[in-house]
Amino acid sequence: MWGEGGRFYWGRSEGEGRREAKGIAVLFAWIPSQESDMKSYVDLYWSLGWRPLVCHVDFLTIFLPDKATSLARGVLDELSKVTKIRQLPIVLVSFSLGSKGCMDKVLQILDGKWQGGHELGEYRLLRDCICGQIYDSSPVDFTCELASRFSFHPTAQRLFRPTRIASWMAKTLLSGLDTVFPSRFEAHREEYWRTLYSSVNMGPFLIFCSEDDDLASYQIIFNFAQHLQELGGDVRLVKWSSSAHLGHYRHHQTDYHSNVVEMLNKAFTCFSQKRRRNACDNISKSVYSLHEVAQSSNESLKRVAIGPNDHFYLPSSSDNSDGREGSSSQDEQKGKSFTLPSINPQGVLSQILFDVCVPKNVEGWDIKPVMSFKGKQTFGSARHDSPMNYGRFIRRSRL
């Protein structure tokens, strides 16, 4: 797929339906390079169960931030199509100058430091999937002098195969940038290194380098690895005393392969830990949300009525300290709220029975609990200690 500033594509796709990918390896190829140049690396990661997504950056893109950002967004959108279906660990792999022009913009967008109007929320899930970075003959210090050496170095001529016209255009452009925009070029260089260092918390690092590589300076790479370790990063630096620029896999295939396998295993472990941590965070947020809802409901139930017309009334502990006056006031409120049924006797006989059965004065009654034959507590009165004389009622009724 072509994007503004370069192109990207899936390295291999055969047998995808018959096997389950362990992860995704995004290969940021050196500048310039062809698909045939990346074939051995595509086969390597494919054989290890990882899907390779290859990105080629145009030479001018490393000097034009807008084009680099557009290409980076295209790569992230392509990765999002996969991670929305199934989350997979993602490892970023940089070759030579591949870390400049697209990979650094990818890191900026995922870190939320690019203020181009694009929301990080679309890539927040994708950021959690980034679990490691691999540098092969990289990172390279981005200067005009070094870029010029890349264009005319014998190794670069063999690897990149630029035409005479392309080499002349590159030399003219670089000299012009260095002369006209020296401060801007230096600002881009500082932003480039700051971006690489800010990604220290995304996962482990694996760096391949050589002591005699005059394009990717060993001292610069060593300082990069050391500073990452000082920032708390998990860094493994693999160096050879003599190895050609971008020729480590070709000349040291066994060591290269074993270190890549170890790195991918660490990346997968990092991805599993991130998922568990995110799951715990989601549970904590859910519990906190339920607690907030319960607290809000509890506060609404604790409302105290001010007047008798409120919908509900819950007495507080202060009501008990008011004594008899508080009780009488509550009785008055209850009297207003509830109306007891009245008894109006009619006729002489009814009046006689009402006078006998309904007490007129209950003050002084000694009401205390007694135990019934079933063991249940009931209330008895001293007035009812003696059995009731039913004959007396009969005699009075005959009158």
Image (spheres, grey):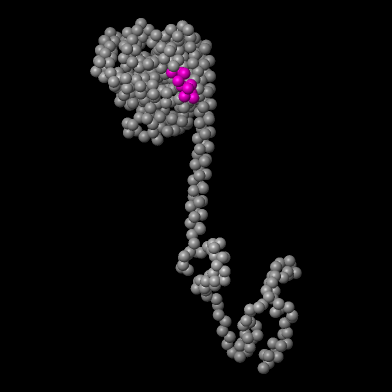
> x and y percent of residue 204 in the render?
49, 23
Of residues 117 and 50, which is closer to you in this image?
117
Judge whether 129 appears above or below 339 on screen.
Answer: above
* Nearer-the-camera pick, 268 or 355: 355
Specify the quadrant that holds the C terminus.
Answer: bottom right
Left or right: where 33 falls relative to 237: left
Left or right of 30 in this view: 176: left
Q: Front-most of 231 and 275? A: 231
Residue 93 on image: x %, y %: 43, 20
**Residue 90 visible in the displayed image:** no
Highlighted range, magenta: 224-233
Eyeballing the image, is 352 above or below 315?
below
Q: Residue 259: image x %, image y %?
A: 52, 16
Residue positioned 71% across, 88% down in the render: 392
Residue 144 image-quadrant placement = top left
Residue 370 shows in the view = yes
Q: Magenta stretch: residue 329 in it?
A: no
Q: Residue furthest bottom?
A: 399
Most frequent secondary structure within the magenta stretch: helix
Where's residue 96, x and y in %?
Answer: 40, 15
The residue at the point 48 percent across, 28 percent down is 88
Q: At x 26% / y 19%, what residue is drawn?
A: 181
Decide whether residue 232 is among the magenta residues.
yes
